[in-house]
Image: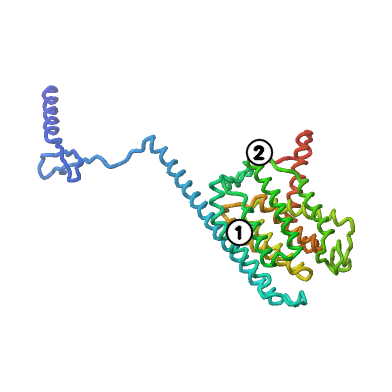
Amino acid sequence: MLLSNFASLQCRNEDSVSSFSLDDRVDSDGSIGYAFSSSEGEESDGDIILNPITDVDIPTSSDRFNKPDDALTTTAYELRMIGKSQKRNRIKYGMTINIGLVTFLTVFLLLLDSHAWRIVRLPLPPFHLICPFTASAVLVSFAGYICVPLFRISRMQMIISKWPARHSYKKGTTTMGGLFLIPIGVGVAEVLVGFSSIEVAGASIATLAFAIIGLVDDFLCLVKRRRIGLSQWVAVGTSFYFWLCARKIASPYSIKMVVPLPLPLGLVCMGGSYVLLTSLCFVSMANGMELTDGLDGLAGGTAALAFIGMSIAVLPICSDLAVFGASMAGACVGFLFHNRYKASVFMGDTGTLALGGALAAMAASTGMFFPLLISSGVIVLEALSVLLQDGLNWKIIKVIELGDGSLDLPV
């Protein structure tokens, strides 16, 4: 009985299993499905089709490393675009500043020429100051397009220190731009005054003497990585003083060695101390101009403003010396077209020392030391800032050497 029941049950199971068939079906998209079919007529539930999931990318270990690379690439690209944008902005700002400076000085000199007779109380030639300014600016600007490529071929490149790192982009920039800046400024002034002014001749000789010192200094820096001392600067200042004593030059109220100061001081006769004041002026102006040239265009722009200020100060005393100042200002402005960001040439010590010597010569010839201090305010502040920084660095070095823990140095 039990055996017969078990046999009948087994036959039913085999019939039910045999009623289903496992067929392979290929869908239109190329995927393979498996279908279970039933043959029980109308009571069957129909075909059951199982389609496996395809087109799913299972992440692998290599994908996890690709995503950070994409992120780094995107970040680097964004940083590069930011750098290019900043560079374009600096170029635009440099051009705007140069155009604004040229426009301001041109309009100012035109107004000054139209009212110069009120200052001098004597008739002056038309365009007395704007003519040397424009001539020097145009000549220096065009000379730069010829001289800068020649300097680059000659490998006259500025030595850039490794610190600070942000100055590394200046590496390879041509230097000694004073070789075409200074001769044009001096030559234009001498031609316009007809080589007949003693004051212009003395200022020109002092300027060229400092240019030669700067040229030797630049050459030694390029070849032997060292610079000359201050003794040559003092020697030029002292020689200029003795030249003033031996020549008949224009001076306030025809009195030599007199320094005009604001009221209530008035005129102060320096006597023998004038040689010390002259030497100090030459050394400080040359050193200050050299320090100011650390940034692109700063020395050229500040020197142009200082020369215009000195031209106004010396105009009532010696109008020819005012022509010299206007010519040197125009040469500085023309140089800025090559010295703006990103600078294609630096003036080097050949230019900076000569510009400082020219300003000092204008002041020493007329006694206008106080106007020089006012017109060269940026140069003076730059020199004082460097002196304070050097003093602070010296103090820090001493503290480190002595092992004194009273000063907490930032990490």
Q: Tell me where residue 371 appears, x and y as whole percent.
A: 78, 64
Q: On the image, which quarter does residue 116 sit in?
A: bottom right
Local SS, label 1: helix
Give the residue number, with chain letter if any, for mark 1. Answer: 336
Q: Are marks 2 and 1 in contact (CB under 8 Å)?
A: no
Residue 381 horizontal side relative to residue 19, left or right: right
Local SS, label 2: loop
Mark 2 or 1 closer to N-term? 2
Residue 246 horizontal side relative to residue 105, left or right: right
How packed mark 2 is, by other alpha carbons closer than 10 Å (few <14, some 14-19, many 20 or more), is few
Which residue is at 20% across, 45% downward? Answer: 29
How packed mark 1 is, by other alpha carbons closer than 10 Å (few <14, some 14-19, many 20 or more), is many
Task: Name which residue type carries label 2.
Answer: Lys
Q: Tell me where residue 190 appears, x and y as whole percent.
A: 68, 63
Observer able to see residue 377: no
Q: CA distance from mark 2 to mark 1?
A: 29 Å
Observer able to see residue 14: yes
Give the residue number, with chain letter if any, for mark 2. Answer: 224
Residue in front for this viewpoint, 294 or 38 = 294
Quarter of the image with the C terminus in it: top right
Residue 167 lies, with reference to residue 334, above or below; the image says above
Q: Tell me where residue 77 appears, x and y as whole percent.
A: 46, 48
Which residue is at 76% across, 63% downward? Answer: 198
Residue 159 lies, with reference to residue 186, above or below; the image says above
Quarter of the image with the N terminus in it: top left
